[in-house]
Each structure stands twice: as structure tokens, then as C-alpha cells.
Amino acid sequence: MVRVKICGITTLEEALAAVDCGAHALGFVFAESPRRVDPVQVRRIVQKLPPFVCKVGVFVNARRDDVFRLAAYCGLDALQFHGEEGPEYCRGWRWPVIKAFRVRDRSFIEEITRYRVSACLLDAFVPGRRGGTGVSFNWQLAREAGGLGRIVLAGGLSPANVEEAIRTVHPFAVDVSSGVETEGKKDPEKMRALMAAVRRADDGIPGL
């Protein structure tokens, strides 16, 4: 089954709504973003979540010791690096690492081969923006990377297009933020619609 991460969670209400809709993972952004969260806030949310939900911290070019401290304090389960973190930076963590790559052309495929991480997240390249842009990219490029490891597909995904995206790319997981928001807040109806579309896609792909 394709896993679903709802990213940019900012409140307990959003977190519980995402979990109730069936999300497998929640993303908390610690970098500069309209969805940036405070560590104390994240810790309180995490403590009230049910078991078997993966809590992912999203960082951009952060100091290693800061990441370690925040991850331990907040009770995170995985780390997502969305900046220029190199292969060496991504090694040696006690948590699984997801490395994000912004896709402009096929050059990202060669870059991925330099990394030894748990999963690679593919997002659209938007100058000056790190994610949550609502912009998609050529999914055929993401499909080409499928043989290089677990692919997490991001970038402009929504209930309207996630089924097609999954059927095209066959990713390990999808990562959605702005596509399930209304006026900057996570929308339970959109999250339910997203999960329904993911299930439809799963039903049509043998072996998932």
C-alpha cells in the first residue's frame, strides 16, 4: 500500500484529523515556512497521538546538534532534510532519514545515487521555495528514479491528481501539504478525499 504523509501539521486538531482520515505519517516543519512549528508545541501534539503514527521532522540546512536535540525532545520517528545537506550529513543518525530533492530535470537521478538514506522525496523546483508550493513536476522523471530506492512523491498533489500520480510513478509514499488545505489550514474533507483517491489507486496497482 502507498503510504501517506500529511505535512505542515501545526495544531493537535489538524494532527488528529489527519490520523482519523488514515494518514500514516505527519510532518512537522522546523524550517522557515508559514507552517513552521515550535518544538514545545510539537512535543505536546506528539504526546497525544495514538500509536503507529510516524512523526517526521522537516529541517533545512540545520546544525546536526540542533536536529538531534529537537528530534529527541519532540519524540520524532524520522528526519526529513529539505536543503543542501550532503551525503555525509545524512549519515549516522539514529532515526531514518528522508532526503528531499527538488526536480528540474533528469540531473537529480545521478545526485540520488550518492545518498544512502531510507527514502528520497521528490518535489518540484520552485526558486526560493523549499516545499509546500502546490506546484507539481513531470512525474515521468520520478518514475525513472523508482529503481533507486523508496521514492516519496511530493509537489502539487491533491485529491484531484494523486490517483493519477500514484498510477504513473508507483511511489513508496506520497507527501501532501497545501493540497489538503483550505485558507492555509488542513481540511478534513480534503484529507478524506485524498485517502479515498489513494485507496483507489492502490486497488488498481498489482502488488501494492
Image (cartoon, grey):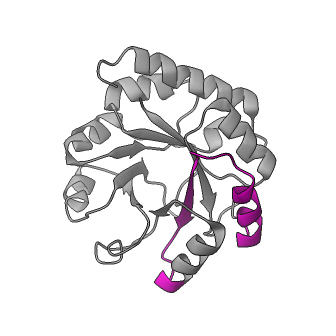
Residue with the most extreme front position: 51
Q: Quarter of the image containing the N terminus?
A: top left
Q: Is residue 136 above or below residue 100?
A: above
Residue at the (36%, 23%) spot, across then down: 167
Q: Position of residue 91 (x, y in %)?
A: 32, 73
Viewer-side residue, 147 vs 111? 147
Residue at the (50%, 21%) spot, across then down: 199
Q: Is residue 115 above or below residue 105?
A: below
Q: Quarter of the image containing the C terminus?
A: top left
Q: Is residue 41 visible?
A: yes
Q: Is residue 84 above or below residue 112?
A: below
For the image, the number of numbered tags is 0
Q: Quadrant of residue 52?
A: top right
Q: Is residue 204 left or right of residue 53?
A: left
Magenta segment boundaries in residue numbering: 37-65
Q: Is residue 3 left or right of residue 49?
A: left
Q: Is residue 103 visible?
A: no
Q: Position of residue 28 (x, y in %)?
A: 63, 59
Residue at the (59%, 27%) spot, across then down: 194
56 in magenta: yes
Q: Is residue 176 left or right of residue 98?
A: right
Q: Position of residue 100 (x, y in %)?
A: 41, 58
Q: Position of residue 204 (x, y in %)?
A: 38, 14
Q: Is residue 61 above or below residue 204?
A: below
Residue at the (48%, 76%) spot, across then down: 61
138 in magenta: no
Q: Quadrant of residue 95?
A: bottom left
